[in-house]
Image: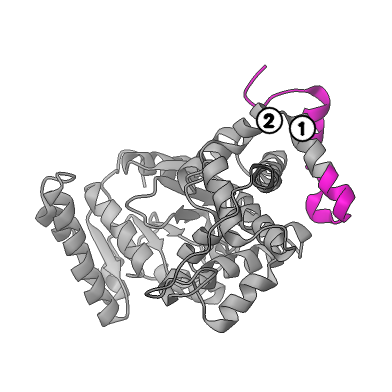
Amino acid sequence: MKNSDNLIPVGVIGSGAMGSGIAQVAAMAGHEVFLFDTNPAALKKSQTSLQQVLDKLQAKGKIADATSVFHRIHFVKELQALQSSGLIIEAIVEQLAVKQEVFSALEAVVSEDCILATNTSSLSVTSIASACKNPARVSGLHFFNPAPVMALVEIIPAIQTDAALPEKLRQLMLSWGKSPVIAKDTPGFIVNRVARPFYGEALRIYEEGLADMATIDWAMTSLGGFRMGPFALMDYIGHDVNFVVTETVFRSFFYDDRYKPSFAQKRLLEAGWLGRKSGRGFYNYQEGATHPEPVQDADLGKMILERILVMLINEAVDALHWNIAAKEDIERAMTKGVNYPKGLLQWCDEMGADYVLSVLDGLYRHYHEPRYRASALLRRMAATRQQFFGE
């Protein structure tokens, strides 16, 4: 793909919510799109849904002609229909063997210069690329759900990826109106790595009995400015998704204690209480059910916010320390990908790295657990009183 080839045909594999959303984004950017699925019912559902969505966008004045956009999307059941694609984005089940099989099959269909991208959120892009005879054309291209709404796209080159490809994809994503960031191929990339304490530390506070779910959610939204509290957000995402990502990151980091899953969340998954989608999660969403009221205690709320926030900051700082991404990309990922009220490195500057470190060290002294170890970069920043974005 050349930088000038902005309107190359785009193939999308998987017509679920994510694949359909990516197809919509590409079609709205002017591309011919081939949306592939082996399940005719799934394709039909996607076709109906996309037509309705585009009609609504036209009615709201967001697009000029829903019909022309919709007619750029071709719903196909044969892999051979993707042969003219200049870019293919895979958005199927998060199983490495299945993705490898698809990528291997694609090479027999597409041209030699077709880019193959995976929308994986937690698997190794390098492992996926290893299934290909030409792994240099493979990259991660991780959209966030819903793809037409969320601006962030993580670009993740595998170690085999051609050095020029990430920038080509970045330029293409900019032409689609997205906010791309480039991340190293490590577990969780940027967002799913850095965001883990938002859930993990909230669960820890809850499991210790220091505060209930409603109070923790209140502290993070009312005092911290987050759009949703961790328990409401886990219920919204679904525990079948959120817990599995946590478990995958934990295992991929060789069982680092910082990413340890929670038994409280595991029990919900075992019970089938998946959150909003099942009508029951941490909260009860069934008809007539009431949500518990938070304890709006300022001191308790400050403790909750501070404890979760310093863990998030430490994770962002450590991602920078290990060159997972540039600091601007880490900030953009957390504000555009999970809608944090501000970048975590900026937040560190405002609180002071020395203060963040003192809270973390206090937690470590209290618990003597490696999950509370401070990043070497945070310790260095605190010692020199240097700022990430200041003098």
Q: Quadrant of residue 388?
A: top right
User: Going by the picture, which residue comes out furthest to the top?
Assistant: 391
In the rendered image, which residue does mark 1 sit on? 355
- Horizontal relation, residue 382 to residue 95: left or right: right
Q: Nearer the viewer, residue 297 or 205?
A: 297
- Horizontal relation, residue 305 to residue 25: left or right: right
Q: Main secondary structure of the magenta part?
A: helix
Q: Could you tell me residue 305's position as x and y percent?
A: 64, 45
- Horizontal relation, residue 310 to residue 237: left or right: right
Question: Mark 2 is on which residue type?
Answer: Met
Tag 2 secondary structure: helix
Residue at 22 percent across and 67 percent down: it is 49
Q: Which residues are magenta?
A: 362-391
298 falls in the magenta region: no
Q: Nearer the viewer, residue 8 or 232?
A: 232
371 falls in the magenta region: yes
In the rendered image, which residue does mark 2 sit on? 351
Residue at 59 percent across and 61 percent down: it is 213
Tag 1 secondary structure: helix
Decide: marks 2, 1 in contact (CB < 8 A)?
Answer: yes
Q: Could you tell me residue 379's position as x and y percent?
A: 81, 35
Residue at 76 percent across and 64 percent down: it is 254
- Horizontal relation, residue 120 to residue 86: left or right: right
